[in-house]
Every structure is written in C-alpha cells, then in structure tokens.
Amino acid sequence: MNAPTANPQDKLYIREPIPVAERKRVTGMHVPREGEDGLFSQTWFPIALSEEVPVGTIIGRDFLDGRVVIYRGVDGIARIQSAYCPHIGADLAVGTVIENRVQCAFHKWEYDTNGMCVKTGAGFPPPANACLYTFPVTERFGIIYVFNGHEPLWQLPDFEYADDELVSSAFVSELYNCDPWIFASNTPDTQHVAVVHGFRFKADDPSKTCAWEDWGFRMKIDAWHQDDEDLSWEAGIYGTSIFLQQGMTDGWWLGIAAGFSMPRPGTHVVYISALVRNVEMEGGKTIQERLDYGKMLLARTAAEDKPILDSIHHRVGFLTKADTALGKYFRFLQTYPRAHPSADFIR
C-alpha cells in the first residue's frame, strides 16, 4: 500500500458568520489542575535520570509543591524522601549518604530507608516522631519514578519484550509551561497527531481502537509519518503522566517510555527513554542507528509541541465527533484519584 499524497484535513467548510453580538465561548467539563485544592494526581511521576544519582550521592528536586531528595546508598537502590530535616529544616540535599542512610549537614542527624531518625550528631536519642516522608519509587530504562501516595495504585506498564531483551537510551526535555496531563491528552487527540505531527492514518481514526483499562488506555496506530516511514504502533497513556508506545517502524521494533514530571503546578519536564531490541541488526539498522532514530523522532515531536503547550490557555470547549477518545480521557481525568499525603513534610 502506497502512502497517500492528499491530506483529507484540507477540506474547507464555508459557513455564514455568527453576528458578533451573539458570539459566546462555550466551556465544557472542568478538569482539575495539578495543585487545585492542594491536591495532586496519584500517579507515577519521573523525577531524575538514573545516571544523575550514582551510588553514594544525593540530589534535591522540586516536586509537587515542595522539595524532595533522591539518593542511592551502597545497596544501589534509589530512594526518595522529603527534603527538609525535621530538626531545624535544613535541606538534606546538601547532606551526605552514609551506607544506606541520609545524614543532615547541619547537625548530623541521620535517617534510615524508612525515613526514621536513627542518630543525632550530639549523641542524644532522636525524638520518637522525628521522620521524613518516604515515597514509593521505581526505576526502569534509565529513569527514576516517584509515586504521589503512600502506596502505588498501579505499576508501570510492561512492553511486549522483557526488560532484559531491550536496550534503552534516556534523556530529558526542556521545561514545559503546562500541567503533565495536558501533554498526556495529546495522545487520544488524534486530530493533533495528524495535523501537528504529520501522521497519515491508513484506515480509521486510531482513537476508535482505544481499549480502556482501570488506569488508562491503549490504541493502535497504523500510519505513515512525515518521511513516509511505515508505522504499526500501539500507544497508551497511564494515569495522568505516563506514555508508552511500541511497535514496528519501517521493519524494526521501537519502544518509547516517557513520563511527565511534576516540579511545580503548571509545569513539567518530559523524561524519555527510547528502546530497541537487543539484536545486532534489525530492519537493516544497528542498535545505535535505531536508538539515534528514536531519539531524533522524540526530540522532533517534542519541539513541534513545545510552542503550543507553553502558550496554551487550556479549557475544554467545543468537542466534535473526532474528539470522542479525547473527551473520554478528560472524563477519566475528572474522577482520577488526587491526594497530597506528603504535604506537611515537603513544604
């Protein structure tokens, strides 16, 4: 099947103008903003690249409406806890990792992997309730993720190939000036996929193939891309912040694991990992050639979206038949669980 040369979106509709005095902007459903009423989505947020946190190091990151530390002890496990020492409030990011504990730089109080203070620099017993908030953490494909909640409501989705069958290359985008879920909503918005990113669908609108699950959806995309690349992909969104895509690109398999971070309400950074099968040649390309193409594709897509998302005044208004899946995702967001159990610790 050959790629089409005509774009079906070129059709122009001639309509009678509405008198200025009768024009109204209609707004539809309300989708909660991150931080609205002091609450945030209970989802997995990426927060650092694995390479940023080698063994024995600790770094600080803004998260939700506060600050956390990420550290890796001698056991090699990445952990995330609230950043401010409950003694006087020093930022633990300027502290030290001692074995698998965090030591505050100010008075040498130490906190274990559960966040409990187990030692003070002066040698006095720690106060019984002196503790940090400890977040659920997972690490995959060169990215460290943190869950906003006491326990994860769901786990990161898997690819069709096992992790040890894949090779990944992770990187980070620039800062975007909108909530993570706004970028996530681009996936079910197949009008956007077609007109901004140049996808030419081979058959029906892929939003008609959406398979909804408890925590997100998957859909099939069979299309040609900007340079006539032949794509047969599955793409999905999980929670308000996780994007997963996998499938064939011109005869070789490409996976994308992307997450939208939450450094502050109304902003996010995209953490992205391109993944390919760990086979020397596939589709006539080496592992490095496939990774390079994947990263180029992702960077190009992000660049196409950035000026739009940095300036968007997002309100749900008129939706059309083409927005069926997008509207369903907005309704999913309306009822998605929101909380802020770490509020007293990270602010």
Image: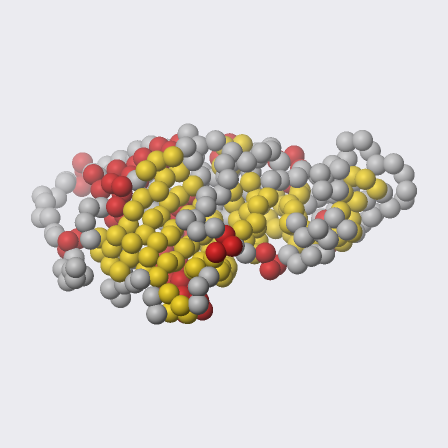
The residue lying at 22 percent from left, 53 percent from top is 201
Residue 173, percent across and down? 47, 58
Q: In this rendering, would 291 be left or right of 74?
A: left
**Residue at 44% over, 64% down:** 279
> Total of numbered circles in the picture?
0
* Residue at screen point 12% across, 44% down: 17
* Residue 168 visible somewhere in the drawing: yes
Residue 141 in picture, x, y percent from top left: 52, 54
Apparent side of residue 81 relative to residue 295 in the rendered image (left or right): right
Against 272, residue 241 (above or below) is above
Q: Residue at x 22, y 56 (%)?
A: 200
Query: For residue 297, which quarter of the picture?
Result: bottom left
Location of the C terminus by quadrant is top right
In this picture, residue 145 sits left or right of residue 330: right
Return the residue found at the far right. 123
Give the quarter of the figure containing the N terminus: bottom left
Applied colour scheme: secondary structure
In the rendered view, would you say 293 is above or below 36?
Answer: below
Identify which residue, 246 or 103, lies in the foreground.
246
Q: Quadrant of residue 199?
A: bottom left
Q: Choose between 171 and 94: the one closer to the eye.
A: 171
Q: Tell me: residue 77, above or below residue 29.
A: below
Residue 35 picture location, percent across and down: 51, 38
Q: In this orientation, which residue lies closer to the viewer: 92 or 317?
A: 92
Viewer can see residue 274: no
